[in-house]
Amino acid sequence: MLRLIEAPTESALSLADAKAHLKVDLDDDDHLIASLITAITAHLDGADGILGRTLAPQTWELVEHAFPPTALSVPLPPLIEIESIKYLDPAREEQTLAPDKYRVIDGGWGRALIIPAYDAGWPATASELDAVRIRFRCGYQNASSPPRLAVPEPIIQAMKLMLSDYYDQRGSVVVGAAVSRIPEAAERLLLPYRIIPVA
C-alpha cells in the first residue's frame, strides 16, 4: 500500500510556461489552464498515474506486512532518498532500521531496490498488515544547491501537447475530472517513461 505523505510543492509544467506554449497573454483563462495542468499531472504522476513514476519531488510511504525474502522494490521512480525504514518488532514495538543495516541500489529511471547490508539480514517483524513502513522521497530533481526540478523534456513536451489539445477542444475534457485521452504524439513521447507494473 502506498500513502502520499507530502505532495509536490511545484508543478512539472508551470502556468507561465503553459501560457507561453498556448500563446495566451491575458489572465482570463488562468484558472482553466491551471485546472488542465492539474488534471494532466494527476493522469501521469504518482501512484494513480499512468507513468508509474513521480514528476516533481514528493514524499511517499510504502506499507508492507513484512520484509521480503531478498530485495525490497521501491515504487514511483526516480528515487531521491530513503527517509526512514520503520517496523514493528515481534513485541509490536516500533523500531527504526539503522541506515547501516541496509543498502539502496539506485534504479536510475526504474525502481530502486533496498537490500540488507552485507553483514545483516532483515529483522523479524510482528504479524501485522502494516509491520513495515518505508518513507521515501522521489521525483526529478538535479543535484544543484538548492536542488531544482528536472523533469525530462519529453515528458514536459507531452504535457504541453496534451494541454494544447484539451485547451483547444474543451468539449472533450471536463475540468477537474480525470483526463482519459492522450494525443498520439504525446503518447509516443511518454512511452519510454512508463513503468511496467509489478505483478
Image: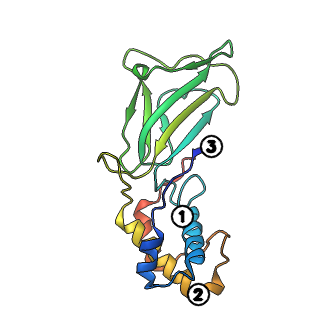
Q: Secondary structure at mark 3?
A: strand
The spot of residue 161 in percent (x, y) is 46, 78
Name the residue that disc number 3 marks. 3
What residue is at 48 percent from the left and 28 percent from the top? Answer: 70
For residue 182, above or below residue 41: below
Q: Which mark is residue 169?
A: 2
Q: Residue furthest top?
A: 91
User: SS of the residue at dot 1?
Assistant: helix
Q: How many marks?
A: 3
Checking the image for residue 41, the label placed there is 1
Quadrant location, the N terminus: top right
37 lies above or below 70: below
Q: Is residue 184 above or below residue 156?
A: below
The image quadrant of residue 90 is: top right
Q: Residue at x 29, y 47 (%)?
A: 144
CA gap, disc 1 to disc 3? Answer: 18 Å
Q: Nearer the viewer, residue 181 or 54?
A: 54
Q: CA distance from mark 2 to mark 3?
A: 34 Å
Relative to 6, is 55 on the left or the right?
A: left
**Residue 198: percent from the left, percent from the top?**
54, 47
State if disc 3 and disc 2 touch (CB < 8 Å).
no
Is tag 2's residue or tag 1's residue first in the polypeptide sequence? 1
Local SS, label 2: loop
| Residue at (62, 72) in percent of width and height | 180
What amino acid type should be assigned to the residue bearing mark 1?
Thr
- Is residue 183 at all visible to an observer of this figure? no
- Dot 1, how many residues are within 10 Å of its Cα: few (below 14), some (14-19), or many (20+)? many
Spot occupied by residue 59 in the image (x, y as percentages of width and height)? 52, 43
Dot 3, crowdedness within 10 Å: few (<14), some or many (≥20)? few
Image quadrant assignment for residue 12? bottom left
Q: Earlier in the sequence, mark 2 or mark 3?
A: 3
* Kind of residue at badge 3: Arg
